[in-house]
Image (tube, helix red, strand yellow):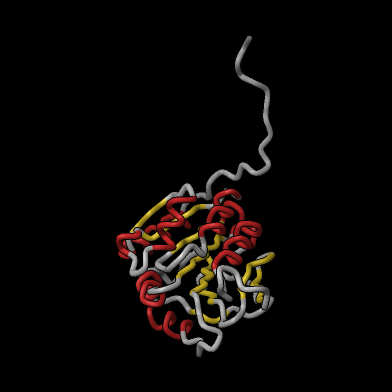
């Protein structure tokens, strides 16, 4: 699939995230026409089992993102412990930059990079978690013409991250986990939102 047509689903999760991610990826089809990039907050010493867990949970292969690895549809890329994972020019980029929101990996760096590289072809998803990581990045995705999706806080094990996103971002969709996969499949099959970043003011249609 040409990079110009590739959709990206960028997902952020924290407390309660592993179980939530298992439910979500179980409902994604093997022929998903989008790449999936995931940041789940991890301790630096984490053994990094999440890709294996997600590969067993659903039909999509999951692996830790590798530096300069091309993004492909139907694959899940998971941020490795103690590295920020970005998407730049259709590839994964790993960095050891400063912690954000007290975390590395953090959600906001992934979301910001998705906004810049994918624009209206990006879909940001905030799942269960504490505090507010992901809110600023989700706003960046919206500002670049992408879609913002948030787990229903009433459905989240830890509702703070979804609540923060809902309070500060004009969210396109809120859904419980049970409906999240079907929603994302529908969104990536639809035409992306109109990309208005290059729009200019045309002649006024009003008459004086």
| Between 176 and 82, the one nearer to me in the picture | 82
Q: Is residue 166 above or below residue 200?
A: below
**Residue furthest top as drawn:** 208
- Coordinates of residue 15 in the picture (x, y in percent): 41, 73
Would residue 59 be seen by someone viewing this image from the given angle?
yes
129 relative position to 208: left or right? left
Q: Residue at x 38, y 60 (%)?
A: 151
Residue 25 or residue 96, whichever sits in front? 96
Q: Residue 120 placed where, x, y %?
A: 58, 51
> Along the line of sight, which residue is nearer the eye, 175 or 154?
154
Q: How many marks?
A: 0
Residue 195 is drawn in which quadrant? top right
Q: Residue at x 40, y 52 (%)?
A: 173
Q: Position of residue 92 (x, y in %)?
A: 64, 72
Vertical relation: 152 (above or below) 104: above
Q: Residue at x 67, y 30 (%)?
A: 201
Q: Is residue 13 left or right of residue 77?
A: left
Q: Is residue 73 visible?
A: no
Judging depth in this view, the residue of 168 and 6 nearest the camera is 168
Expressed as whole percent of the image width and height from the top left, the position of residue 54 reads 43, 79
Quadrant including the N terminus: bottom right
Q: Quadrant of the C terminus?
A: top right
- Left or right of 4? Residue 25 is left
């Amino acid at each position: 699939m040409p990079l110009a047509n590739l959709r990206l689903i960028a997902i952020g999760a924290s407390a309660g995230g592993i179980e939530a991610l298992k439910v979500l990826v179980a409902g994604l089809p093997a022929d998903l026409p989008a790449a999936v990039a995931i940041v789940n907050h991890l301790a630096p010493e984490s053994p990094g089992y999440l890709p294996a867990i997600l590969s067993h949970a659903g039909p999509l292969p999951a692996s830790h993102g590798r530096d300069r690895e091309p993004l492909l549809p139907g694959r899940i890329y998971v941020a490795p412990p103690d590295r920020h994972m970005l998407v730049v020019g259709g590839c994964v980029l790993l960095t050891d930059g400063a912690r954000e929101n007290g975390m590395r990996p953090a959600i906001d760096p992934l979301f910001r990079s998705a906004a810049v590289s994918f624009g209206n072809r990006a879909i940001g998803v905030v799942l269960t978690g504490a505090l507010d990581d992901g809110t600023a990045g989700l706003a960046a995705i919206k500002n670049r013409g992408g879609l913002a999706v948030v787990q229903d806080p009433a459905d989240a094990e830890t509702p703070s991250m979804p609540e923060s996103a809902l309070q500060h971002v004009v969210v396109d969709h809120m859904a419980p986990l049970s409906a999240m996969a079907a929603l994302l499949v529908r969104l990536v099959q639809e035409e992306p939102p109109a990309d208005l970043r290059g729009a200019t003011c045309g002649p006024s249609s009003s008459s004086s």
